[in-house]
Amino acid sequence: EFPYGYVLHKCKLTSDCPKGSVYLGRPWREWAKTVFLHCELGAHIHPAGWQDWKKPHDHFYYGEYNSYGPGASPATRADFSHQLTDAEAAEYTVERVMKGWEPQTF
């Protein structure tokens, strides 16, 4: 099992798309998991943040921690998404997320 999925840390999301027109994620497949930590979100991010594509909410996990910028809006995020606590965010270390992954040498 892969407990972490996509983890975006200290990213800056920018775009010339219209304000509020882009979601942070949506479940292309079952068991999707995406978390944004300490990311700057531009105004193009939709206030709900996440789209569920009418899939069961127990089949994916979407979370944020300490987002900032004009697209950061914890109060308006989709009810199935998660605003991580300090303790939950502390679980996302490089060692834990990358455990078992060995970079390829070319």
Image: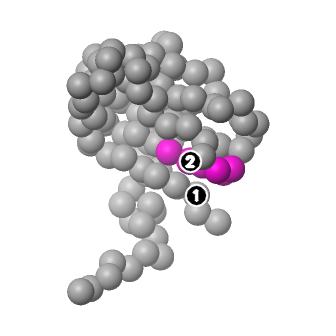
Query: Badge 1: how crowded within 10 Å, few (<14), some, or many (20+)?
Result: few
Where residue 92 appears, as percent x and y from the top left, is: 43, 51
Instruction: Say which element carries label 1.
Output: loop
12 sits left or right of 21 in the view: left
Going from the N terminus, do you reach mark 2 or mark 1 first? Answer: 1
In which quadrant will I find the N terminus? bottom right
Boundaries of the magenta span: 29-34
Characterize the local packing of mark 2: few (<14), some (14-19) or many (20 or more) Cα atoms within 10 angstroms. Answer: many
* Residue 83 percent location from the top left of the image: 50, 28
The answer to whether mark 2 and mark 1 are in CB contact below 8 A is yes
Q: For this rendering, which residue is in front, 98 or 14?
A: 14
- Residue sitting at the far bottom: 106
Q: Position of residue 94 (x, y in %)?
A: 36, 60
Residue at horizontal 27%, vertical 34%? 13
The residue positioned 58% from the left and 63% from the top of the image is: 2
Q: How many marks?
A: 2
The quadrant in which the C terminus is found is: bottom left
For image coordinates 44% across by 61% down, the residue present is 97
Identify residue for label 1: 3
As for residue 33 lying within the magenta part, the answer is yes
Q: Amino acid at mark 1?
A: Pro
Q: CA distance from mark 2 to mark 1?
A: 8 Å
Numbered label attached to residue 49: none
Quick one: which residue is furthest to the front in this view? 17
Looking at the image, can residue 71 be seen?
no
On the image, numbered disc 2 is attached to which residue?
33
In which quadrant of the rendered view does residue 68 lie? top left
